Image (tube, rainbow, N blue to C red):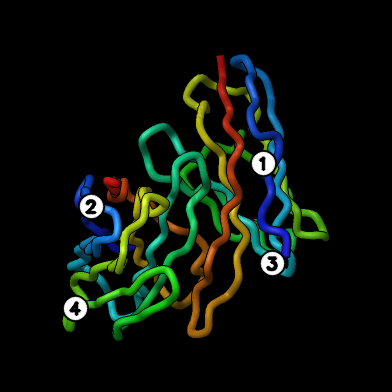
Amino acid sequence: DAKTTQPNSMESNEEEPVHLPCNHSTISGTDYIHWYRQLPSQGPEYVIHGLTSNVNNRMASLAIAEDRKSSTLILHRATLRDAAVYYCILRYSGGSNYKLTFGKGTLLTVNP
Amino acid sequence: ETGVTQSPTHLIKTRGQQVTLRCSSQSGHNTVSWYQQALGQGPQFIFQYYREEENGRGNFPPRFSGLQFPNYSSELNVNALELDDSALYLCASSAPLAGGGDTQYFGPGTRLTVL
């Protein structure tokens, strides 16, 4: 799996937008960009994924650079419940695509 | 819809012992993956089961083994426990995505402590 680079930590204030960056300069054309997050004392949970176009769902938005070498997870209004470790993961879309390769992720702190 | 459940929640064992961890997958999911998460690290893939067959394995020794049952629940067995096996063990069941790949739904994990 191609490698991703994320900041170790970020801080935000409650009800403000948060932009979590991810660099993936070696991404291939068949790699999807997935984001998972892990709340304290819980297993990871799926947030969003995309291939080329920007994506929105009820949890977040994913903005993908035109060259696909970077992406940004956007939380439009951070809440205290969004404090978690956020993982950016590349996944090959074909073949036996059976595992998630986690890095260390970004620890997001949300201040009240 | 019931999510992924794991048992037990916590477990304490001594070095050299054997342990079995259990996972019930989300309804309708026929694929289960197991991960090990050491403190302060991201989860590391152990192996995956699809319809009762192993479907890929990470860099873990053979003393880590697994089973998947006809109802798609799964077990992770670890023999000859070592101190470094102390970790959070996560189970995830998968739902396929249109266009390829899947979304994995994780359980809360089993915290294993080896003394």
Q: Quadrant of the N terminus of chain B?
A: bottom right
Q: Are marks 1 and 2 on the same chain?
A: no
Q: Residue drawn at (69%, 61%), measured in percent from left and top?
A: B26
The total of numbered circles placed on residues is: 4
Chain label for disc 1:
B
Please identify, in this view, whether the residue under mark 3 or under mark 2 is nearer the observer: 2
- What kind of element bears circle 1? strand
Residues packed near mark 3 inside 10 Å, few (<14), some (14 to 19) or many (20 plus) = many
Chain label for disc 4:
A
Q: Please name the amino acid that badge 2 sits on.
A: Ser
Q: Are marks 4 and 3 in contact (CB under 8 Å)?
A: no
Q: CA distance from mark 1 to mark 2?
A: 38 Å
According to the picture, the residue beneath numbered tag 1 turns out to be B76
Q: Is residue B89 above or below residue B23?
A: above
| x, y percent for residue B13 | 64, 19
According to the picture, the residue beneath numbered tag 4 turns out to be A65
Residues packed near mark 4 inside 10 Å, few (<14), some (14 to 19) or many (20 plus) = some
Q: Please name the amino acid that badge 4 sits on.
A: Ala
Chain label for disc 2:
A
Q: CA distance from mark 4 to mark 3?
A: 33 Å
Q: CA distance from mark 1 to mark 4?
A: 40 Å
